[in-house]
Image: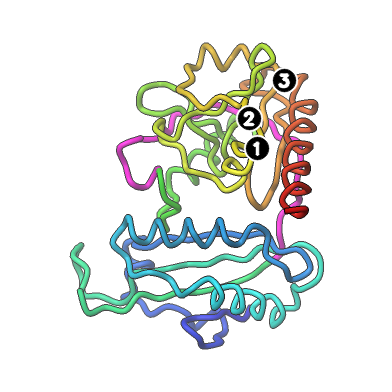
Amino acid sequence: MIIWRDGEWLEDGDVLPADDRGLTLGDGVFETLLAMDGALAHAALHFHRLASSAAALGLPPPPEPQRLEAAARETLSRNGLDRGRAAVRLTLTAGRSARGLTRDPSAAARLLISAGPAPEAGTPVRLATVSVRRNPASPASRHKTLSYIDSIMAVREATSLGAEEAVLLNVRGRLACAAAANLVFRIRGNLVTPSLSEGVLPGVTRARLKQALPEMEERPLTRREAEAADGLVLTNALRGLRPAVSWDGRDLPGSDALKSRLEEALSLAEDRASVV
């Protein structure tokens, strides 16, 4: 694999020194984008979220979007991934520093861009509620930080329960998200997604759906309310819209129809945008 790091091209074995805070402390943020035939999908939304997260966590800003896009496209090309579907990852670390939690003010942040095959999109998924909880007060719940241990442990637990993905509640016992996706429910015909204030990562696909479907409610959602849903779809920039076949062993027969409704709304929104 060939990786871009701050303007240099490196083999993946020579990317980070042992004292980089992204490696030692998970001090950094990242974005993962879908590429189709070398073109980045919804790049402006991802670049904006990367810059916003960097500012919120006190990290230096990433390069300007034009430079990021050019470097990402070149990374795809150098890795032979400029045809078909691919995944591009942008990783911003706090850079090298001495031991301890305090960042060295003179340390230079690092930006890495890598690429690999994208997972299949739209695949059905079985879900299990896990014991891992989202903390709405934690910055890690609102930004894609380099520490993803909660999601890792959540998927591990879900797998042990016979599912492929995890549903996470927050510390108040209300619905939050999946380990690597946002959630959209159909409850008595209404579309509902948990509020960002519940410890939900502001997903790019989620934001697009909110704009395309003004009728979709965004609010706190208790587990009891959510269990009345007959359809549930996971949204993720790489994997698209995934219908939930079941949740905690209960079938969700309306998930395919919900997926079709969401896909149609996104398609119509893109058509309107292209006309404008």
For badge 2, the amino acid type reads: Leu
Whole-number angstrom distance, CA of label 2 to CA of label 1: 6 Å
Sequence-first tag of 3 and 1: 1
Residue 231: x and y in percent read: 70, 22
What residue is at 25 percent from the left and 75 percent from the top?
Answer: 97
Camera-nearest label, 3 or 2: 3
Sequence-first tag of 2 and 1: 2
Q: Nearer the viewer, residue 116 or 58?
A: 58
Q: Which mark is residue 164?
A: 1
- The region drawn magenta spans 117-141
Circle 2 Cα neighbour tier, 10 Å, few/some/many (<14 / 14–19 / ≥20):
many
Image quadrant of residue 27?
bottom left
Secondary structure under tag 1 reads loop
Camera-nearest label, 3 or 1: 3
What residue is at 56 percent from the left and 87 percent from the top?
Answer: 9
Residue 115: x and y in percent read: 64, 70
Q: Which mark is residue 252?
A: 3
Q: From the image, which quarter does the N terminus lie in? A: bottom right
For badge 1, the amino acid type reads: Glu
For badge 3, the amino acid type reads: Leu
Residue at the disc numbered 2: 127
Residue 94 sits inside the magenta stretch: no
Sequence-first tag of 3 and 2: 2
* Total numbered labels placed on residues in the image: 3
Cβ–Cβ below 8 Å for labels 2 and 1? yes
Question: In the displayed structure, does residue 52 sit left or right of residue 181?
Answer: left
